[in-house]
């Protein structure tokens, strides 16, 4: 130690010392706070005769869960399945809402964002009204509107309203539609699809190489879509001529005659989407789309007009300008807020608890918590699931940002 | 060289002429904003685009126009406005449904909303005490209006008062004060604050040598804060003759505003501290702030509300108990502090390096440069972000209905269950009302934030 | 800039042929109700170097932007290389690949390197193999004298270098006509020279050029014709010598006195 640190008075003036001292104090107070909380929790639990532990996950759950994809995957059975199964069902149902919702909201959001920039006043007006109306109302209101004001007043069990002809129908018990049935030989179709995807990848690489080498540009889009459609279809055709139909479409059955109690949609035939899921899905998709539309609009507007002009000036057409100049630059601006909207959609699916669609918060933190107590464990597990989602999102975002960062001097 | 036949001199000025019809007037406007997007048939792709545009325009016009008309029809044209015979549900149902209206009729049921007006705005707050809520509402709107009014005198002071004195004032009026705060607590607060200020004064005058003179401001801050808390505690423990109103009787717009405003006001200081922590170069402080922020931002508000309603009683010592509203408030506060921290951090990041360097160069300490140079600029810069966070929070307050509090939407939802008014129009009318109220608030605030954004970006150029 | 440093200019290399490349007749343009271009008549022959000057807001940028259809005109006729400009997308694409343009604010694509900026259009518009396009881009980067910056991104280059990349990018389409929209206005004084030198080289290569600029030295040395515009009209056209020494119109005299006084 040098002379200047020889006594305590000088140490106070040392910047390093101050910073270390402050940080240690901070750390100790945080640790003390957690110890205090743990101690309180412990004494409160003992007083209640409870104890901390994850053993309850192996107990059997004794409540009904609305049939959804999750219950189907886990094959849920009241009295046999455990609370861990309930946890898994919650995650799967959250996931299915998130994935399908993200796809749909992206399509709608991008279309509306582009409408908003159109020079057609009707499109622009529609987009503006849509955006302002949807994002200035609480999501829960959207959800209640769809569930209580739209789906709850649909015709009862024994009636239906047709959508898109006979194959889709809706009533108070849910939305019914056709479902694919996999017969013997469907593996060939799956292989065919896989094969055609590989073929498309090989072809597009080849086309890119040819483009770079000779300048000749194949109509990649048309050829690829041709491959994707034709190969599986022809396999299907050949197989069904030789043996049987590998994939059938099963339409929902609606009985209008027979005993009165048996009328209505038959259970287990065709695809059914419960109204809870439909309401949640509609609310999440339409609400998030209004935010995505604004992000898309801002992203495209962020590209300076000179970029488009310069691109036109070197002779690139509208499509190429969009594809080679505007979109690569707009994506830099669009993707980060877009990912956080995706995360928001996933987190907002927890609102399902208000209409009892069985996702994570609703069945695990709601029903299961009411039955077993174990608040700390259940809320901890739930938080961990969401934190994992957001951690993955931010990992992706960091990767993306470092990849697309503009080099500056 | 060629002959110079291009030589040219313009002798007279050509006057401005009116543009051709395709450029101006109604036709020009229509052309530019409607038909130009659907009239290019010079190549196959352009023609295809034009045709798609035409179809889209008509579909949207039909769909949007139809929806808009049915909304207006429902809300205004076909709506029932009064219920002179006090039929309740009878006034809004058709003959087939047991009411008085012709069958096939569909429209909003406004008498239902008029009857539930008090519930939606005040919840179950005692009718004879409503003046207290009204006074708070009035102060709130006048105060905010004055603060936002361009060029009003002393608007920053009004703003400061709205952030400090108003919450206390509202708390006293809404609950009735007369809290049981012991004299020993008050005395302790007072004593500590005097002690801190005394030490601050000592260090300022260098009575203790110049060893700890840097601590002057710290002492002062602690002293003044404690003194303010003492004053608040004192004011809250006085009996004003107001009757006590349980928070469980609060509801409707009152709860919405209380949750949203408390959330935003309390989250601002916490958010600033977290943002500074995340931007600091002390690794432990940075890690703690980052974990805190990312934790709260990573989980949905519902989880937070659940956690605060079931975990808070577990985590606190036996005997300490908060009521439902306070629990929700704590959850909302921590949650929005994390979002606020990120907004403030954005403002700090946008500050050019030169500002930090300039502040150090003139010899300001870290706290001084933050307080005098960096934060005032960074915070002004992020006003739009703060307003947007507030809009988000305002909409999210609806979630408190899940833990059993009755905010605006929760109250509306509960009135729908009223069988005396049961009719098909009941739910849509209630949602329409709540929707209009939220829309007015949120749309207004978002316009204000856009206005600020434009103003700030002008100022920066 | 001293006399010794200035580039030698060999007027004999800059021949003008009889072939008409741009023809503008009675052209009018409005922005809303504002009449920006009024009855413009202009014929440009192959190899001409035309400088367009005038006070700001006189419509000079708008005029050259109309020539490659970045702006639409509402009345009159514009023909470039014998092709009339109208709504036809095919024609516009053809003209844009024959007319190069350099902007005041460079408008380089920030997400592409200098080389990629240059090779983008040859690859996608002229359907050139990538290797060939890269060679071509390199060739023009050498012509503008910055081959060593080829792999850098626009953000890493100085203003003058960026503008030279922009010129190379336009040249890569091997245009017959080059339009310059105030190419040196956004540059620091020491960088103006490097850009002007590049333009002089181009002129000596026989390029047809329309230049909107306030660099009167450049106009005197390189241009064979100077056009003065004011309030959306061409007020005066003359050879540089007569234009500067013997302006005919009062408005020209006023303008010249304002910009040459210092």
Image (tube, rainbow, N blue to C red):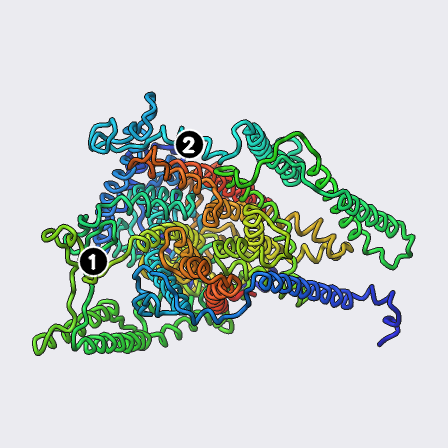
The residue tagged 2 is B116
In the picture, residue B92 is in which quadrant?
A: top left
Q: Residue furthest left?
A: A241
Q: Chain of mark 2?
A: B
Label 2 crowd (10 A; few <14 / some 14-19 / many >=20):
some
Q: Are the residues flagged by discs 1 and 2 from a single subunit?
A: no
Nearer the observer, C145 or A77? A77
Q: Residue C98, how many percent across, how many down?
A: 33, 60
- Front residue of B293/C53: it is B293
Q: Secondary structure at mark 1?
A: strand
Q: Quadrant of the C terminus of chain A?
A: bottom right
Q: Which corner quadrant holds the N terminus of chain A?
A: bottom right
Local secondary structure at mark 2: loop
Q: Is residue B268 left or right of residue A24?
A: left
Chain of the residue that carries numbered disc 1 in the rendered image: A
> Which label is found at residue A167?
none
Residue A85 coordinates in the image, percent (x, y): 38, 69
* Residue A8 percent coordinates (x, y): 86, 67
Instruction: Using the image as rendered, state which of residue A338 and residue B248 is in the foreground.
Output: B248
Extreme-top residue of the structure: B84
Mark 1 or mark 2, whichever is nearer to me? 2
Image vertical order of residue C12 relative to residue B89, above or below: below
Q: Is residue C49 visible?
A: no
Does residue A399 appear in this view?
Answer: yes
Left or right for B41, reference C223? left
Q: Using the numbered discs, state the Cα–Cα distance from disc 1 to disc 2 in whole angstroms.
A: 41 Å
- Residue at 70% x, 66% y is A28
Q: Nearer the viewer, residue C252 or A32?
A: A32
Residue depicted at 30% across the width and 48% down the height: C78
Q: Which residue is mark 1?
A: A177
Q: Residue at x 51, y 50 (%)?
A: C214
Decide: few, some or many residues near mark 1? Use Cα within 10 Å; few <14, some 14-19, many ≥20: many
């Amino acid at each position: 130690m040098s002379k200047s640190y020889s006594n305590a008075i000088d140490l106070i003036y040392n910047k390093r010392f101050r910073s270390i001292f402050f940080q240690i104090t901070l750390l100790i107070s945080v640790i003390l706070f957690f110890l205090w909380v743990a101690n309180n929790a412990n004494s409160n639990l003992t007083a209640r005769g409870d104890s901390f532990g994850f053993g309850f996950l192996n107990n059997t759950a004794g409540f009904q869960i609305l049939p959804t994809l999750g219950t189907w995957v886990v094959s849920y059975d009241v009295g046999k399945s455990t609370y861990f199964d309930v946890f898994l069902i919650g995650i799967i149902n959250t996931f299915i809402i998130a994935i399908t919702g993200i796809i749909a909201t992206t399509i709608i959001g991008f279309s509306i964002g582009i409408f908003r920039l159109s020079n057609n006043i009707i499109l622009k007006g529609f987009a503006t009204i849509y955006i302002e109306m949807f994002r200035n109302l609480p999501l829960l209101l959207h959800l209640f509107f769809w569930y209580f004001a739209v789906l709850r007043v649909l015709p009862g069990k024994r009636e239906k309203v047709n959508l898109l002809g006979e194959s889709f129908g809706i009533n108070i018990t849910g939305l019914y539609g056709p479902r694919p049935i996999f017969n013997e030989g469907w593996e060939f179709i799956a292989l065919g699809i896989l094969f055609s995807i590989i073929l498309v990848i090989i072809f597009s690489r080849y086309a890119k190489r040819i483009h770079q080498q000779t300048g000749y540009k194949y109509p990649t889009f048309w050829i690829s879509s041709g491959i994707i459609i034709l190969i599986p279809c022809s396999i299907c055709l050949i197989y069904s001529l030789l043996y049987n139909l590998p994939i059938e479409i099963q339409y929902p059955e609606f009985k209008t005659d027979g005993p009165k109690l048996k009328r209505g949609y038959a259970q287990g035939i065709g695809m059914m989407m419960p109204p809870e899921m439909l309401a949640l899905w509609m609310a999440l998709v339409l609400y998030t789309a209004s935010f995505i539309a604004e992000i898309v609009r801002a992203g495209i507007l962020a590209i300076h007009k000179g970029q488009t002009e310069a691109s036109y000036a070197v002779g690139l057409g509208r499509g190429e300008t969009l594809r080679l100049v505007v979109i690569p630059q707009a994506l830099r601006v669009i993707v980060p807020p877009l990912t956080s909207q995706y995360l928001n959609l996933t987190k907002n699916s927890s609102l399902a608890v208000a209409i009892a669609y069985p996702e994570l918060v609703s069945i695990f933190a709601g029903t299961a918590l009411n039955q077993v107590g174990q608040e700390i464990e259940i809320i901890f597990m739930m938080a961990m699931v969401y934190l994992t989602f957001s951690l993955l999102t931010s990992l992706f975002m960091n990767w993306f940002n470092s990849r697309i960062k503009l080099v500056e001097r | 060289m060629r002959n110079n036949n291009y030589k040219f001199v313009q002798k007279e000025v050509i006057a401005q002429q009116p543009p051709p019809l395709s450029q101006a007037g109604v036709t020009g406007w229509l052309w530019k904003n409607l038909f130009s997007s659907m009239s290019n048939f010079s190549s196959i792709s352009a023609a295809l685009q034009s045709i798609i545009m035409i179809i889209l325009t008509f579909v949207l016009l039909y769909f949007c126009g139809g929806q808009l008309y049915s909304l207006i029809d429902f809300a205004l044209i076909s709506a029932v406005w009064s219920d002179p015979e006090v039929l309740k549900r009878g006034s809004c149902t058709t003959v087939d449904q047991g009411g008085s209206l012709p069958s096939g009729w569909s429209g909003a049921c406004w008498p239902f909303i008029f009857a539930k007006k008090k519930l939606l705005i005040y919840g179950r707050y005692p009718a004879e005490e409503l003046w207290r809520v009204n006074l708070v509402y009035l102060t709130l709107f006048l105060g905010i209006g004055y603060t936002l009014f361009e060029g009003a005198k002393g608007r920053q002071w009004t703003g400061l008062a709205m952030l400090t004195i108003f919450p206390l004032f509202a708390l006293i009026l809404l609950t009735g004060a007369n809290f049981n705060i012991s004299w020993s607590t008050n005395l302790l607060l007072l004593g500590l604050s005097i002690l801190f200020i005394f030490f601050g004064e000592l260090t300022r005058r260098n009575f203790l040598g110049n060893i700890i003179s840097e601590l002057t401001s710290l002492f002062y801050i602690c002293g003044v804060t404690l003194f303010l808390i003492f004053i608040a505690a004192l004011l809250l423990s006085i009996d004003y003759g107001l009757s006590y109103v349980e928070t469980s009787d609060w509801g409707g717009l009152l709860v919405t505003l209380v949750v949203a405003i408390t959330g935003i006001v309390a989250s601002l200081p916490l958010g600033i501290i977290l943002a500074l922590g995340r931007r600091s170069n002390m690794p432990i402080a940075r890690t703690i702030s980052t974990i805190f922020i990312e934790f709260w931002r990573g989980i949905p508000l519902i989880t937070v509300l659940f956690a605060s309603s079931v975990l808070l009683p577990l985590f606190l010592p036996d005997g300490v108990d908060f009521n439902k509203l306070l629990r929700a408030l704590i959850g909302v506060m921590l949650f929005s502090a994390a979002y606020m921290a990120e907004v403030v951090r954005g403002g700090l990041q946008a500050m050019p390096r030169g500002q930090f360097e300039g502040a150090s160069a003139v010899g300001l300490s870290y706290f001084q440069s933050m307080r005098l140079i960096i934060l005032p600029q960074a915070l002004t810069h992020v006003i739009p972000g703060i307003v947007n966070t507030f809009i988000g929070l305002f909409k999210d307050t609806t979630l408190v209905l899940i833990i059993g509090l009755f905010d605006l939407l929760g109250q509306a939802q509960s009135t729908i269950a009223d069988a005396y008014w049961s009719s098909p129009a009941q739910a849509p009318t209630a949602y329409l009302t709540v929707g209009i109220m939220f829309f007015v608030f949120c749309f207004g605030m978002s316009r204000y934030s856009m206005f600020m954004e434009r103003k700030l970006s002008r100022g920066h150029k | 800039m001293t006399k010794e440093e200035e580039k030698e200019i060999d007027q004999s290399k800059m021949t003008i042929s009889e072939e008409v490349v741009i023809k503008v007749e009675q052209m009018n343009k409005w922005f809303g109700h504002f009449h920006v271009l009024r009855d413009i008549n202009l014929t440009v022959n192959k190899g001409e170097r035309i400088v367009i000057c005038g006070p700001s807001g006189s419509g000079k940028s708008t005029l050259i932007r109309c020539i490659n259809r970045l702006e639409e005109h509402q009345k009159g006729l514009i023909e470039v290389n014998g092709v009339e400009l109208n709504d036809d997308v095919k024609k516009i694409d053809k003209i844009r690949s024959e007319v190069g343009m350099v902007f005041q604010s460079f408008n380089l694509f920030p997400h592409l390197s200098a080389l990629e900026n240059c090779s983008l259009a040859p690859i996608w518009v002229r359907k050139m193999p990538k290797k060939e396009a890269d060679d071509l881009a390199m060739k023009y980067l050498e012509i503008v004298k910055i081959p060593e910056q080829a792999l850098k991104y626009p953000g890493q280059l100085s203003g003058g270098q960026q503008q030279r990349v922009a010129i190379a990018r336009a040249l890569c389409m091997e245009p017959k006509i080059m339009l310059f929209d105030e190419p040196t206005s956004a540059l620091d004084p020491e960088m103006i020279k490097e850009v002007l030198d590049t333009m002089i080289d181009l002129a000596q290569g026989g390029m047809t050029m329309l230049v909107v600029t306030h660099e009167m030295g450049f106009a005197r040395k390189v241009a064979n014709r100077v056009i003065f515009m004011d309030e959306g009209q061409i007020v005066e056209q003359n050879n540089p010598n007569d234009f500067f020494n013997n302006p005919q119109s009062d408005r020209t005299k006023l303008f010249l006195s304002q910009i040459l006084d210092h």
